[in-house]
Amino acid sequence: MASSSSTAFNSSSSSESRDSQYEPRSPQPATPTFSEDARLMQTPTSPLASDFGQRALRSSPLNPSSPSTPSFMRPMAGSIGSMSSRPDSRASSSHQFIPSKQASYEPSPLPSATGSRGSMILYRLADDPSTVRDSLLMPPRFAGGRDSVASSTRSSMISFSDSKYPSGIPQPRGLVPYEYDPEADESGPADDEDYLHDPNEKGGVRGDKGAFPWRGILNVSVLCLLILGLLSLFVIYPVITYYRTVARNRLIDGNIRINATGQAPVLFQMPQLIDPDTPPAARSRTGFDGEEYSLVFSDEFNVEGRSFYPGDDPFWEAVDLWYGATGDVEWYDPAQVTTRDGALIITIDSVATTQSGLTPGSTAPFTRAENHDLEYRSGMIQTWNKFCFTSGYIEVSVTFPGPNEDTAGYWPGAWTMGNLARPGYPATTDGVWPYTYDVCDLGTFPNQTNPDGQTPAAAIFSSASRDRYNNELSWLSGQRLSACSCPGSDHPGPTVERGRGAPEIDVFEASKDKQADHGGTVSQSAQFAPFSHDYTYQNDTLDKWRNYSPERTRANPFRGSAVQQSVSGVTRVPSGMFQGSGETFTSFGFEYYGNPDHREQGYVMWQVDGSPTHRVGYGAVGPDPEPTGSGIGQRIIPEEPMSIILNLGMSPNWQTIDISTMLFPGEMKVDYVRVYQRKNEINIGCDPKEYPTAKYINDHLEAFMDVNMTTGREGHASLVANYQQPKPRNVLHRFGPMLTGH
């Protein structure tokens, strides 16, 4: 077979066209033997072969100076003139196509070159669609339908073998040759990427000359958005997060029950500020001011049989004392307060009750001797120094004792007081209650008079005062913790120039209607000190005073006495809320706002049975200058942390007691207590940084713990009878004479 193959090569080489190239199968070109290369170097006799040689010798950018030797020829051993113009490589070597001895073929002509630069032969991958060209050089077609395959392996330059399987139409594989004409390529339409290499091109999104540079604008815009996104993520977002969570973080700070993320564990029998039994619908509200409020404290009193003796409850404590400041006729005993059937029960008993067990909470019968020589026994609970809030909305739902709305004698109350005084402990309230004053002037002096005791005239005599006070405006001992305190004084802070006190705002104080024969009412008031002349307040604008419900609410004609000034309204209550007339729970509450930075925004607004009753604004308790006024400055809406008090008392100083209209045991029931604050202004706790109380209380713990620390009277000044803690010195008033220094 070897000799017949050689014969086939010699007979076909003179007629085979070199334009019919073959496709190498080996990945590396083989080094030919001398005998094989000698046969490859035979001079072609075909015109096509000559034509191919001419094409190969044309100048081109890749072949600027063509040698006289055809580029497809390589040097042979013993041959001098047969030198190739480029190194031997798989991509650029040209070989004659060697058919089998039986094959006849039809040559595939090369496209004619145009221009003077000439064309060149390039190779592409057969399966690369990005390089498909119209000038693909097709392999020759043979009669008989068989393809011959040439191998260029290094072990054998050319081998001859008939294709075992006829293919009909040849399928290119591997590297496929094609003709590339640079001039024809440049004269054709521009490719999309050509503009990227043109320094004079202005470009656009699609590279159109003269177009607006949308592509550049888009690139810059994306870059700016990326930078903005990074700034938002690492700068803006952390700042916003800080200010949105600062209130919560303040609550977390120092609270050992809450972790740094604000999570509080729900532990067995551990108290929570928000009672889990509070309905979801009641955990937020829209305030009368239009602001969104969040629930910050609640007690639904659903746990049966709770005890409120000292230390038994985390938020409430029942007191054991006589409330002598208001001349009460009952003793407050912790045994009178418990929970039953989903409500807090405060029971008032009488020594006249001789039968036991008339109500589950009654402790009757008892004697006067067993009850501190008092005829009645009742209860008071308070959150003093356990839970306090500063600004917000408090709501309680209650029923009143008595057979019906005409009962006269009980004094049910729900109220708040500043944490610097403890209700029922006279040594703590002296000179502190009900001051809400931050001005250094004679309003801080005892009796609101100058040291001469003769001025101002409005303080010496007031027609609105009472005979028992000699018609004098004030019998207060002076503001103990005033803005006039000398440096280094015994003052709770944050500075001695901040006026401090224990203001009072009442949710309600109930009584029989004092201006009608029938019906029950509640007084809803705010207490202030020092006092304006005749205890007047300004009501010439709706912002200062407003009555929202004239058909049931009226301004209270009682405006104060020598121990307090009151701004209040009186509202009739539903007749079905009494112990003997249905015991329908009715809601009472007030919303207030005190802002040290914008005090002019301060107000207190009350509601009964879910509807607003009246409102008092900052301007109502404005300055009262001399000579006609008392010479004091602006009082403020309370800014102190406020504790909560619930009690059921009796006093002839509150209303005429008519035993025939009363029922014993009497019960005041409380369905719930809920406190809300503006979502972005949460401020709960009894020792806030702006108005601290803890250190002052600890420094005077005896007064806050011993109810027997009482006050005495000497002249018009209230002195502590058995508590010798001196008052801070006043920069304007010391030991009698008015001073401007220390």
Image: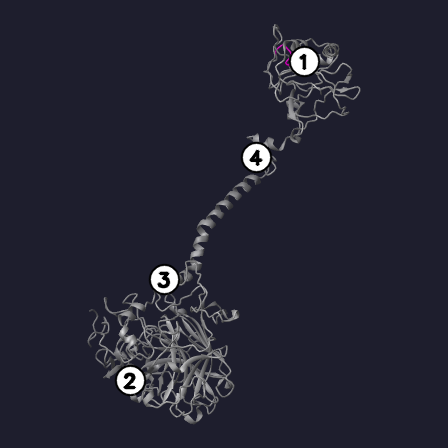
**Is residue 716 visible from the viewing direction of this image?**
no
Q: Residue at x 79, y 19 (%)?
A: 143
* Local SS, label 1: helix
Q: Secondary structure at mark 2?
A: loop
Furthest residue toward right: 144
Identify the disc placed on residue 598. none
Residue 53 bears which disc, if any? 1
Q: Residue furthest bottom?
A: 660
C-alpha span from label 1 to label 2: 133 Å
Marks 4/2: CA–CA distance = 93 Å
Q: Amino acid at mark 1?
A: Gly
Residue marked by disc 4 = 202
x, y percent for residue 186: 64, 26
**Residue denoted by label 2:** 472
Q: Which residue is mark 3?
A: 254
List x then y, in percent, for residue 408. 43, 90
Local packing at callout 4 (Cα closer than 10 Å; few below 14, some 14-19, many 20+) is some
Q: Nearer the viewer, residue 451 or 700?
A: 700
Inspect the image, locate mark 4, and give the three-letter code of the amino acid beneath it. Lys
